[in-house]
Image (cartoon, rainbow, N blue to C red):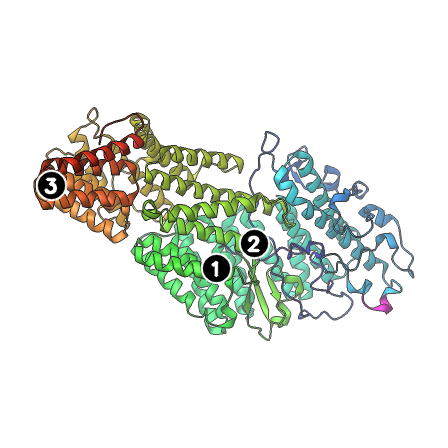
Amino acid sequence: MSYQGGPAPGNGNPNANASGYWTGHGHGPPNPYGTHDPRVHQGVSNGAHPQYPASSSHSHGGGQPQYWNQNQNQNGQEQYINPSYTNHHTSSYAPAPPQQQYQPSPASSTPQYISPAQLLQQQPPAQSRIPQQYQRTPELSNGRNILDPVYINPPRMAAASSDPIHDKAMLLISLAEEYFESAHNLAPSVVFSMTDADVHAYEKLVATGLGCLDTALKNVRLPPRLEANIRLRYAGVLFEETNNNMEGETALSKGIALCERNHYYDLKYAMQFLLAQFMAKKNPKASMKALDGHVSESEAYQHYPWVYVFRLLRASHSLDSGIAIENHAAINNLNAVTELAERQGDHAIHLTASLMKAIAYMKRTGPEAMENIQASIAAAWRYQTESSCRIPQLIGLTHILAVACSIRQGNSKAMIEDLKKMQVMMDDALKNPEWSTTSDVITIPIKRTPKSSQIVSSETRMVLGIGEDGGDNLMMRFLNKKDTYSITYLLSGMVLLHKNSADQKGFKFLKAGLDLLETDTRAPKKPPGLLPDLISQRQWRGEILCYFRVYMAFCSAGLGDWPETKRYIDDLRATARSFNILPTGALEFLAMYLTGVYHQGMGDLDLALNIFQEAKFALPAAKSSITTSADQLHRDISLLAALNTLWILQDSARQDSSMNTTLIEKLRPFCETHPSRDIQTAFNLVVATVPTNPPAQMYVIKNYLRAALGGASATANTQFLCITLNVMCSRFFSNVVGDQAEKSAMAASTQATNSGNILWRSVADGMLAQCYEVQGKKELAQETLQQAQYFAQKAAPGSSSTA
């Protein structure tokens, strides 16, 4: 969950893109000639599109062009339209009319598009209605108005135009919004094809809309507030659709100066917010420093809603940096938000900041981080019974973080309890219409203050909006209902993975989540939106699909089903290529480790060793300090690779007791006190089974096996229970006559059956057959031996050995 503001101006509703930045629900831009009432009641839409960061590249046509950066002049300068537009030659603005399929209102007659240059060349009569070809349908299919109410509501104003200059500005605005709307309607089809022609058509529509706004700014004498609104809208589109940062920053700088001269505090804060986001693209430190200044200023004037906004954005930028010291700065800002929200009674803000703190602490390591995560989640539950805090998206996030915390803690009982609560909540959320299946925007209520009328208005609704009750609303982004549901499926599969072999519930959850996400990703009909957002959303879903396939491969490997394991590994790579996901980070390490496990399971030990001994899995010489969860994950996978290596080296042709001792001592400082009980258990099993020089004493081996059994029981890990019982049976009851030996062999066989792993079932039944043979139970021994051979043949086709 990151805070980048709510929907960009004019993109607040996927079914209402045409309304742009100039209208609320039936309201147009502020009247520059009269007193502006910033508290006009308007419903806050929850139908906005996701504000994902723009994807860096997308493959199409064999190359990887960046659609937001495609136009460059001879000096390499970025442009959002042709070079003549950059030089501000108004004669080059004439756009080609959009194709019929891009029209926003198919029910109306074919719209007639007009270029900004043509508009300036023709002076309309001073006392006449706007020509019919320049008018837009007052009510679009989405039910929201595009033009100022002066053209559609007051009869006395509709009869004649009293200000031709104002009319020109409104027509340019209308044209710009119509081009933007056409582009956003086209975007869903473009994101699937990504052909040069489709991308160019989208770019051309956006560039022409920008040209209309630029013409209004440069060639029309605008009232101050209308000019400020146009500058904000113009910069907003540049930020969302292009990499033309310099142009956007220049527009905002001029806009901020204009707002300061005219005391437009609401628009000034909105521009500072957007400018900080521009700065973060090229210089995050400068952006964070600027935000610190905005926080001080808004605190001094007691403009508390904007204090929340700037501090939350500052925290998001700090968390995005991935730097430990910035993580601390993010937590400091979030603590300040919770304290202020507590004083002001803004409990929904308190809830939001508490959840963000939990996320920030999850990026840290160590026992102190776990305590802080739990404390932050407890603080989030504090006010969730209040009506203002019954926000389904935030309640869902609280449950998700609780499950993630339990997984990290390794408490199997807490995992199951939190998982059940999360599943009940999400099932209830399916019936809740307040949580959209397409919108990523949520509204966080803020109590109105005496100064709200000066700092919050309908023009700032991309950050701070006005609710139907007249209160202030902070606009934030979160996953829509469908995407959140897929995340809960993934978490359910992860929680149940350790005992998936017994009942296959973990795999079933993963399969259901995979099918849900794939079906939605391939859906032909998508709501309109910004192309960069849709591309980023698609790539995010591609990454989640990769994680589904990773854990499904682990499920298959746990069962010893190596053909299925290979299939999911291949699907993982195909998905990464299809969604243009670079092989970096956690996915890269998991995919490499899985590939090594597959080759080890298939008996290709040389190739498995080559993978596990890759430089990427190298461990440091001594236990080093790990400060981030990403580093912890990398080291944990490297530890698993090293443990696999140790077991492979026990092959008779490779066994070296001295090398075993060296490797065990290298792993000991990492594993013995590791926060994960499962990694401790794996290490204890390795030490108990690997021969060393000098050989370990029997009481030492018993202690390690006892610790392994305790760890496996504590985490309810059926795989580890199976391995531990089989190792104990082999170590202590091989060729032993008596009831205890038979009970041990039967317990090992039962646990192997529960694990579902055919290889270990072969091992356990082989030992049980040997036990029966020693006990003189010939018929049972023969029957059990045949069963062991059957499982051995399934585990390794062509083999007839029992173990």
> Whole-percent x and y of residue 656?
17, 28
Residue 690 lies in quadrant: top left
Mark 3–mark 1 Cα distance, whole angstroms, equals: 50 Å
> Whole-percent x and y of residue 732?
11, 41
Q: Is 241 drawn above or below residue 18 in the view shown? A: above
Residue 562 lies in quadrant: top left
For residue 646, side relative to residue 64 (left or right): left
Mark 1–mark 2 Cα distance, whole angstroms, equals: 39 Å
Residue tagged 2 = 276
Specify whether residue 327 is painted magenta. no
Residue tagged 1 = 427
Q: Earlier in the sequence, mark 3 or mark 1?
A: 1
- Please name the residue shown 78% across and 64% down the image: 149
Which of 91 and 559 lies nearest the eye of the viewer? 559
For residue 288, side relative to residue 90 (left or right): left
Q: Quadrant of the C terminus?
A: top left
Q: What residue type is labelled 3?
A: Phe
Residue tagged 3 = 732
Q: Is the magenta stretch mostly helix, strand or loop?
A: helix
For residue 70, side relative to residue 174 (left or right): left
Q: Residues within 10 Å of mark 1 (few under 14, many from 20)?
A: few
Q: Find the magenta span and give its range.
A: 153-157
